[in-house]
């Protein structure tokens, strides 16, 4: 795409309310735009990244047999009366013209359990894994940290349905691995830890995935040896790593990027979701739920991958593969742009009439993994620099294509 | 995908409330599930079709230079006070915990105009074409006709921004052509007519796209010669075709599947969206808007493409390319399934332990364009039947692959 056509231009300033690193870079770079506190528009660059994160998640959840559906945002209020959650304080409650009460979904247990109940009767119908990628709403008293804690946000929700605890436990382990693959692919694998939290009424532990970053709102306690962490509650209770029992736990600031949770029979019980087993006995379905906030992952990626000049996008979710910049060399620039496109490379081409300094500054801010500069100096070659490196090299277009194809493996 | 794993199974019955053809087939076939009046879940098969419609629309709107963004569903109430639309009766009005008033978007003028205003200052910033594919909400007194008139629905909204009427008019003509391409590709091109409606305050005409079907709520008046139509208001006013002036206009029942509308300066004026022209004068931006309801298109496709036994999906938006059915021939079935998959064919493989009759009935209901049957009788060949044809032929797998590749051109 030609940058002269890209909406919007980058901004030099950002509102003082945006104190988080992710919001500052994302707003300045033209990835997002704030409509009001906790509610953002994804601009073309931001939506490209969001869609790539969405596709990584979709591939990994499909690989553990998830079937994608798309549930509504408007829920019937009476379903929340059934589960006793009609008064939880994060719900929005719109009403119809005739006075019917709705809830805007902040999760989807109250929709998916009655849905599944219509189709499940026998042990042969289980297990079942359904997920969706959908906008959700939380009536937060205080929205903050850019897109990390919003009133409206995009979530991947996976729900699993099982005949018994054993079957659930096996799938729960698979989901853990799928989650770590997702975080690795979006570029926060090294900073993200499976973190043990309290399991509530039903099990000893539940688990969240926490990414270490200075700006994190949470504190976790790392066991470096086991590459896991525990949250504050657990460290207060047992003061040791749940796996190796070491008491050498190191506190770090972190952001929660995903959670997996044993629901067991809480919602099956509320909606009488049961099945008939091999012996003709009726049994309650055992459930798990598994969430990832897409905007939160996007914001966390930026918190983890940046320098003073801007974002450093991980290869797999970058808005473009290559940022091609022409400095007074439009003929060469146009030729290289069309050659790259013919080779299937996704290029942002800075064809604008701007100074070299301002173009290079924008490239650092936007953070595309590979920067190519063509100028009168470069002749039929280009200057290639990776965003994460400081050194540039002069090379031929074939060498560039070679680098890109290795990167996309 | 193996049909034994597909959620959900087809249903023999459907609620008596679902009187429309589209809802009956879509619910029975397991494409959608009703949560409450006007609010549906898209199940795996339905979501596949919806995503394919989404991709057709995205390709055609990108081709006329649309840039995709993603705006929020929660809007600030004060923006509707600015445009004087705060009391229109189709709006939902959720409130925050602290009493702040929001609107759930039923369209996005109140968000996109203030957004664009932050970035546009000069004639050099125009024209600009922004669109989104997003869930919208209408507080309908009576939701009806399955997914045709919902309280929650997915829309493609395109907004265009221009320096003057001439530039707008040129783009408006391009948008008309893009819309006809969309309707042709999703399989309702032959039944869909550009229909002249009143232009309101700003122009002589606006335009809607109407698809002819017995169950339509609207009536349009066709000029067969010009392949256009007019709505009731226009026929009452001028009694003739706006293009050839013929009075030979034929009434037909129809469904509105899209609309394009000159907004001119109505919203630019409300939000003071202006730009500086070449002579340094400040001028108001001229706008157009262009909508398509994705669920409505999906429902209309079903209304137009069906027979007594079920849906007949057009090739480009079918949930799968091929429905492979094994009748007591699992070994052959498995082999053919894996060969088709290796050749990049998207197959639903009916590997269930069901009777032949029930499998064939389900295949007709679900409506995938090509049905292949393998049985003891077919040997190393398969029986191929197109859903829209009545005749089946015995052929080799190579002939099948040949047919599919021709279909996907």
Image (cartoon, coloured by chain):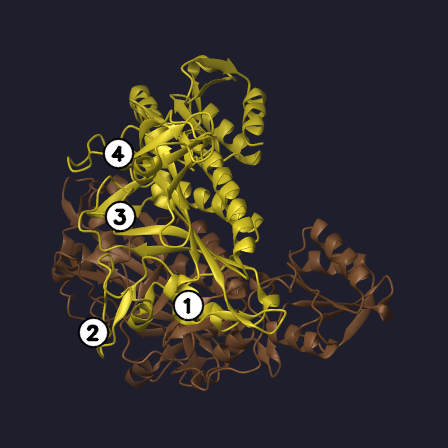
Chain colours: A yellow, B brown
Give me the residue at 87% from left, 65% from top: B379
| Image x and y of residue A179, in percent | 48, 42
- Cα separation, mark 3 vs mark 1, equals 31 Å
- Cα separation, mark 4 vs mark 1, equals 49 Å
Q: Which residue is mark 4?
A: A28
Disc 3: CA contacts within 10 A as few (<14), some (14-19) or many (>=20): many
Q: Could you tell whether A304 is left or right of B43 in the image?
A: left
Q: Are marks 4 and 2 in contact (CB under 8 Å)?
A: no
Q: Which residue is mark 1?
A: A269
Q: Could you tell whether A317 is left or right of B329 in the image?
A: left
Sooner in the amino-acid sequence: mark 3 or mark 1: 3
Q: Which residue is mark 3?
A: A150
Helix, strand or loop at label 4? It is helix
Which mark is drawn over residue B89? 2
Helix, strand or loop at label 3? It is loop
Disc 1: CA contacts within 10 A as few (<14), some (14-19) or many (>=20): some
The image quarter in which residue B366 lies: bottom right
Q: Chain of mark 3?
A: A
Of the pair B8 and B230, the residue shown nearer to us: B8
Give me the residue at 44% from left, 27% from top: A369
- Cα separation, mark 3 vs mark 2, equals 28 Å
Disc 2: CA contacts within 10 A as few (<14), some (14-19) or many (>=20): few
Foreground: disc 3 or disc 4: 3
Does residue A3 show up?
Answer: no
């Amino acid at each position: 795409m030609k940058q002269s056509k890209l909406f919007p231009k980058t901004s030099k300033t950002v509102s003082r309310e945006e104190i988080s690193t992710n919001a500052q870079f994302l707003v300045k770079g033209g990835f997002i735009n704030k409509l009001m506190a906790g509610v953002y528009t994804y601009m073309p660059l931001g939506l490209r990244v969001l869609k790539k994160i969405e596709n990584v998640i979709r591939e990994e959840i499909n690989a553990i047999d998830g079937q994608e559906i798309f549930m509504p945002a408007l829920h019937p209020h009476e379903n929340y009366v059934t589960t006793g959650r009609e008064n939880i304080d994060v719900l929005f409650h719109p009403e119809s013209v005739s006075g019917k009460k709705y809830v805007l979904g902040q999760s989807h247990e109250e929709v998916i359990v009655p849905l599944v109940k219509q189709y499940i009767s026998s042990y042969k119908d289980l297990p079942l894994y359904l997920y969706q990628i959908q906008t959700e709403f939380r009536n937060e008293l205080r929205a903050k940290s850019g897109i990390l804690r919003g009133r409206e946000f995009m979530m991947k929700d996976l729900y699993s349905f099982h005949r018994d605890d054993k079957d659930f436990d096996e799938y729960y382990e698979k989901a853990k691995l799928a989650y770590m693959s997702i975080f690795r692919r979006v570029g926060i694998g090294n900073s993200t830890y499976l973190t043990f939290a309290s399991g509530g009424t039903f099990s000893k532990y539940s688990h969240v995935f926490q990414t270490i970053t200075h700006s994190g709102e949470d504190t976790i306690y790392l066991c470096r040896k086991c590459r896991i962490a525990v949250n504050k509650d657990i460290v207060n209770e047992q003061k040791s790593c749940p796996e190796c029992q070491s008491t050498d736990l190191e506190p770090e600031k972190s952001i929660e990027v995903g959670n997996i949770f044993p629901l067991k029979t809480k919602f099956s019980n509320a909606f009488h979701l049961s099945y008939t087993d091999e012996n003709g006995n009726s049994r309650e379905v055992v459930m798990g739920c598994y969430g990832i906030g897409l905007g939160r992952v996007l914001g966390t990626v930026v918190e983890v991958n940046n320098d003073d000049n801007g974002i450093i996008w991980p290869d797999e979710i970058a808005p473009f593969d290559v940022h091609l910049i022409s400095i007074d060399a439009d003929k060469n620039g146009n030729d290289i742009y069309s050659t790259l496109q013919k080779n299937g490379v996704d290029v942002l081409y800075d064809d604008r009439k701007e100074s070299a300094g301002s173009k290079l500054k924008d490239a650092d801010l936007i953070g595309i993994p590979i920067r190519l500069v063509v100028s009168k100096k470069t002749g039929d070659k280009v200057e290639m620099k990776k965003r994460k490196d400081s050194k540039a090299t002069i090379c031929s277009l074939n060498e560039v294509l070679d680098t890109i194809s290795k990167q996309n493996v």
